[in-house]
Image: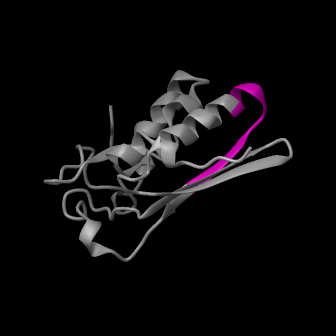
């Protein structure tokens, strides 16, 4: 399901497509751009599974607050034209950089996303931690 992108220089992507494993830590392969946002074609829906779009995400964040931003984006995408911009903020905390040796990637400290639709915008900055659950995501519409 997850793949190294052979069309991208090896210096610009992770070393492995394997699961992020660290004893005592729960991280998943989290998408920056989710596959269901690219469901307009079979070719497009495969693109988000390249490791150039995958980063270590705390499991409860990936299935919690970050998932809720994807669900909100999907709702607006189905009702209006939507522009989505997002990325990560890297910190200087080597204590959580569990995957530099196995994958060649540091662990992002924060993920961010902005949805722009009609004359409104919704923005999130979400910590890459176990505390980033759906219930903790504050939304003002």
Q: Taking 30 as reference, is 83 left or right?
A: right
Q: Residue 16, relative to residue 97: is it above or below?
A: above
Viewer-closest of 128 and 103 = 128
The colour scheme used here is: one colour
Residue 50 visible to an observer of this rendering = no
Question: Can you give x and y, in whole percent of width and height, for residue 109 in the image?
Answer: 41, 64
Specify the farthest residue to the left: 23
Viewer-closest of 78 and 105 = 78
Question: Can you give x and y, in whole percent of width and height, for residue 32 in the image?
Answer: 49, 47
Q: Residue at x 49, y 41 (%)?
A: 134
Q: Residue at x 50, y 37 (%)?
A: 34
Q: Taking 21 as reference, is 68 left or right?
A: right
Specify the farthest residue to the right: 119
Q: Taking 104 as reference, is 139 left or right?
A: right
Quadrant holding the C terminus: top right
Q: How many marks?
A: 0
Viewer-closest of 2 and 91 = 91
Question: Can you give x and y, in whole percent of width and height, for residue 101 in the image?
Answer: 19, 63
Specify the farthest residue to the bottom: 92
Residue 57 visible to an observer of this rendering = yes
Q: Residue 123, relative to residue 69: is it above or below?
A: below
Q: Which residues are magenta?
A: 76-86
Q: Quadrant of residue 107?
A: bottom left
Q: Taking 98 as reference, is 4 left or right?
A: right
Question: Can you give x and y, in whole percent of width and height, for residue 82 in the image?
Answer: 74, 39
Q: Is residue 64 magenta?
A: no
Q: Residue 95, relative to residue 112: is it above or below?
A: below
């Amino acid at each position: 399901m997850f793949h190294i992108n052979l069309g991208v220089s090896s210096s610009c992507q992770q070393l492995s497509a394997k699961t992020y494993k660290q004893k005592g830590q729960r991280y998943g392969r989290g998408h920056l751009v989710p596959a269901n946002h690219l469901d307009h074609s079979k070719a497009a829906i495969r693109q988000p599974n390249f490791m150039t779009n995958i980063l270590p995400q705390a499991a409860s964040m990936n299935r919690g607050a970050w998932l809720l931003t994807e669900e909100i984006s999907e709702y607006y995408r189905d009702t209006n034209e939507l522009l989505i911009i997002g990325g990560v903020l890297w910190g200087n905390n080597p204590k959580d950089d569990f995957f530099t040796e196995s994958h060649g990637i540091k662990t992002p400290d924060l993920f961010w996303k902005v949805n722009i639709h009609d004359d409104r915008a919704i923005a999130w900055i979400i910590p890459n931690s176990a505390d980033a659950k759906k219930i903790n995501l504050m939304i003002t519409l």
